[in-house]
Image: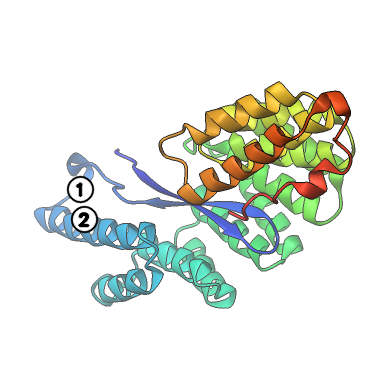
Amino acid sequence: MILSFSKYLIKIQPYSLFVYFFITLNLFSCQSLSTEDDKKNENIISSQLAIATSQLDRGSPSETITTLNSLLKEFPKESRAITLLGVAFISLGNNDKALEYLRLAYNMNPTTSNGLNLSSGLISSQNYNKALNVLKAIIAKNDQEYKQHERLYHNLGFVYEKMGKISSAITNYKKALIENPRFYLSHLQLGKIYKLNKNNPQAKYHLEKASAACVNCYESTHLLATEYINDKQFPAAIKVLKEFINVEKAIPEDKASAKNMLSIINKLNPATKQTTNLEKKLPNSKKL
């Protein structure tokens, strides 16, 4: 069996939620399809799903919806297309419609990845108790074929964080990191929690890990630089910002923010202790 996934990282405002959606694009190998018609249909479906994901990647969710609706007229029970429809409506900010499709996909095909997608949709709609129930149910199944368990624990941690249960949030973020020690999202959230609670050593540790795991993600770089500045580690702050600016795949807007932050730091003279209220002078990280 061949499994290939298209990955979407969506920032749901204003809840600072990074959501990963996984759409299985090529579920079966040719050997596992029983007839020539099955193979032909799978090729058609995979081709149309690839077009739809490309449209979403280009920032054209409306085009994605048109492509998928056309596909579903011919293959109305294709849960991959239904899940991707949910993702497209999330991109458009239509959470109610997104949840309708994500629930339908999960009911039709209750896989772990579809359950994770549904939990993400519920979180984005602030339905935290329902998201908690979905996540607990799919984690209890202990699906050994699903290889990204860190994503389940991360979503569970995020739910607990939004519910104000910080200890449980930390526990589950750490479980996610046991599954995948380089998982960017959990390092980032732990860094934010420890920063908020003035635990600078732990905040720096997790933000350093996050920045290393995703070199073109500016939010972790920005937060890490501010932590270095708070500890008057100006050379370290300058270093991480310069490294980010040199990342080829970084978004130009993010590079501009990093350059602006760097120019402010370079104007400060630590010897004269011109560091009062520095964070207030620095530009906020761009909302991804």
Query: Is residue 265 in view from this perspective?
Result: yes
Classify mark 1: helix, strand or loop.
Answer: loop
C-alpha separation, residue under disc 2 versus residue under disc 1:
9 Å
Amino acid marked by disc 2: Glu
Q: How many marks?
A: 2
Image side of residue 99 versus residue 36, left or right: right
Classify mark 2: helix, strand or loop.
Answer: helix
Query: Is residue 214 in view from this perspective?
Result: no
**Residue located at (83% from left, 32% from top):** 230
Q: Quadrant of the C terminus?
A: bottom right
Reading the image, the residue beneath label 2 is 42
Provide residue 24's location: percent of width, then percent of height: 37, 50
Instruction: Tell me the mark number nearer the camera, choosing from 2 and 1.
Output: 2
Image side of residue 160 versus residue 28, left or right: right
Amino acid marked by disc 1: Leu
Which is nearer the eye, 197 or 123?
197
Is mark 2 in CB contact (under 8 Å) with mark 1? yes
Provide residue 156's location: percent of width, then percent of height: 70, 47
Q: Which mark is residue 33?
A: 1
**Residue located at (28% from left, 48% from top):** 26
